[in-house]
Image (cartoon, helix red, strand yellow):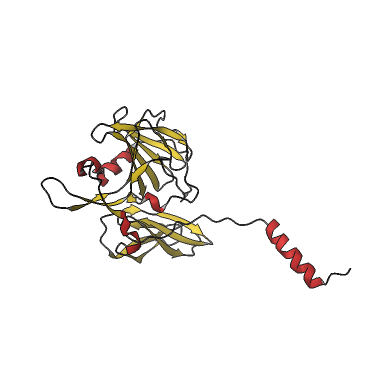
Amino acid sequence: MNIPIYQLVRAIVPVLLFLAPVQVWPDLPKPHSFPGGISLIPIGIHEHKPQVFFGIDPVLVIQENEEWFAVVGVHMNMIPGKYMLRVEHPEDTTPQRSTLPFTIYPLHSKYKQRSFTLPEKFTPDQFLGLGNQQLRSMFGTQVPESGPTTPDFNFQHVIKKGSFLPFGKIFSQGDNQDVILEDHPKISYLVSGGTIAYAPGNGIVENIVGRGSPDQKIVIRHSDHFRSILSFVNNSPLEVGDQVEAGEPVGTASLIPSIGTGRIDWYLMLNSAEVDPLLMIGPASE
């Protein structure tokens, strides 16, 4: 039986497309240009990688389909409005500088669930976060140059099972105060003391702060611009300079007598800005 040529072509082409190698580009994060989120700003097509700054802080720059993008972490306390990036092209014969505007929007109604009421048995001071200056001061330790440099925008939960207080704003009320709204720039996992904690992504241990104390902090550098800070980690076998993989045990949750349970906090830093870890957790997470 003779098969028409056009039918043969229609049958063969899908097979060839399936067998052909597929160019895999980096998975860009989904933009969420509001406080605590991520702005993804196109810079354009350039022969060399531009350098980008938001204020004095260098910004993560990645390439997809020949176009460069700036990945900007937006601080929780950033006031919505127009902002500028500074873009430099140091590899050009004549170095050029330019500015690039972008907009930070108010928190969308879709994400209002990030404002939540603190459970009655907890008090606000039990969940006060570290200030930005304290977080940044953790990054001074020198570590081996080896380690991850290509950002991966898929993370996983630090605690596999248990409840948590999400990143966002906390409505709380004390004995001598009206309801107030406080920043909660992290995820706080509430579990049994001794529950195993896991690395949220591949990285290198950059610093260990307060070793042996109940609120011991482990700083993991995932890439040149991404870091996780895990606080209240107990029984950690890690040392500065160790390589860790996503899902690798990093210690256990410390038992906190004041709340009668175990706890671990997870801060996710992008360009020194605290961003919502829940925006970065991939679909494969448990």
Residue 77 or 221: which is nearer the viewer? Answer: 77
Q: Is residue 185 visible?
A: yes
Residue shown at 25%/55% (left/top)?
Answer: 77
Give the residue drawn at x 35%, y 56%.
Answer: 37
Pick whichever, 246 or 93, lies toward us: 246
In-image side of 25 versus 84 (left or right): right
Residue at the outermost right position? 1
Task: Give 286 or 52, whichever is nearer the viewer.
Answer: 286
Residue furthest out toward the left: 176
Whole-percent x and y of residue 220? 40, 39
Query: Would residue 267 be found to the left or right of residue 50 on screen?
Result: left
In-front residue for pair 112/41: 112
Count the numbered circles shown. Answer: 0
> In the image, what residue occupies the spot 28% across and 52% down?
116
Which residue is the extreme one toward the front? 120
The reply, left or right, for residue 72 in relation to residue 12 is: left
User: Looking at the image, is 23 positioned above or below residue 208?
Assistant: below
Q: Is residue 241 visible?
A: no
Where does the image place residue 97, in percent across and percent down from the top left?
37, 63
Please tell me whether residue 104 is drawn above or below residue 265 in the rendered image.
below
Q: Is residue 79 above or below residue 157?
A: below
Image spot of residue 206 (x, y percent): 39, 37
Residue that appears at 29% across and 43% down:
135
Where is the N terminus found, in terms of image quarters? bottom right
Percent position of residue 112, x then y: 31, 59
